[in-house]
Amino acid sequence: MLRGIFDRLQEARQGRVLVRVERRKLEQGWMDGRVAAVGPHLLALHLVDDSIVYNGFTVLRLKDITALHMPTPYAGFMERALKLRKQRAPRCTWLDVASVESVVQSAARKFPLVTIYQETIDPDSCLIGVPSDIDARMMRLRLVDPNAMFGPDEAVALRNVTRVDFGGGYEDALWQVLSEREPADRRTADT
């Protein structure tokens, strides 16, 4: 099954086809987007949100995908709306989807915050923060709360990560407010 999904996602990436991905065992609903990258175990989507604009990236485990629609329903409408809004999905040559470790490392070079989901152990929450000390097993995340304030550091076991988001409007808004409050040397201290 994974091989079939991998091949279809590669086809969608090469053809720049909008897809819909479902992960019914982990969450209700779906995600629409353009395939940014596909690795042996991971998929990166450039998300198209309900406003029909690109809204950051999500990286998902292939083994969690329960349905793949290619193209997504209403793709013609979505493509036209994206074009009229001058929305473009850039090529993601910078994103390494070989492993969760490489995803977080490459995302952190381009974006200040990442959102980490561990849905198999905590399905109702996520962690947002500045990643550091990343290796093949663990990473440290300097948490940012919903008030755009730094919280404590949290150790995250990469084997528990089911999804990584970055570059979206919410992460950007948190970083803008936090940056206004915190001098640059305090934002990067201890990371």
Image (tube, rainbow, N blue to C red):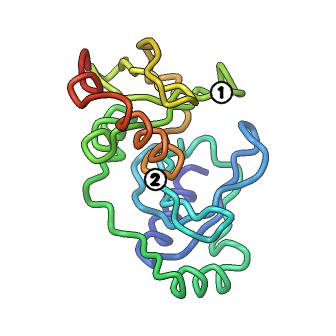
Residue 87 on image: x %, y %: 47, 76
In-front residue for pair 131/156: 131
Q: Is residue 12 left or right of residue 133?
A: right
Q: Residue at x 33, y 39 (%)?
A: 112
> On the rendered image, what quadrant is the C terminus found in?
top left
Quadrant of the rendered structure where residue 132 is? Answer: top left
Q: Residue at x 62, y 71 (%)?
A: 52
Q: Residue at x 47, y 24 (%)?
A: 149
Mark 1 vs mark 2: which is more N-terminal?
Answer: 2
Query: Total number of numbered labels?
Result: 2
Q: Give the residue number, with chain letter if any, for mark 1.
A: 125
Q: Give the residue number, with chain letter if any, for mark 2.
A: 44
Q: Can you say whether 179 is above or below 94 in the image? A: above
Residue 45 on image: x %, y %: 50, 57
Residue 190 on image: x %, y %: 25, 15
Residue 94 on image: x %, y %: 25, 54
Q: Residue at x 45, y 65 (%)?
A: 10
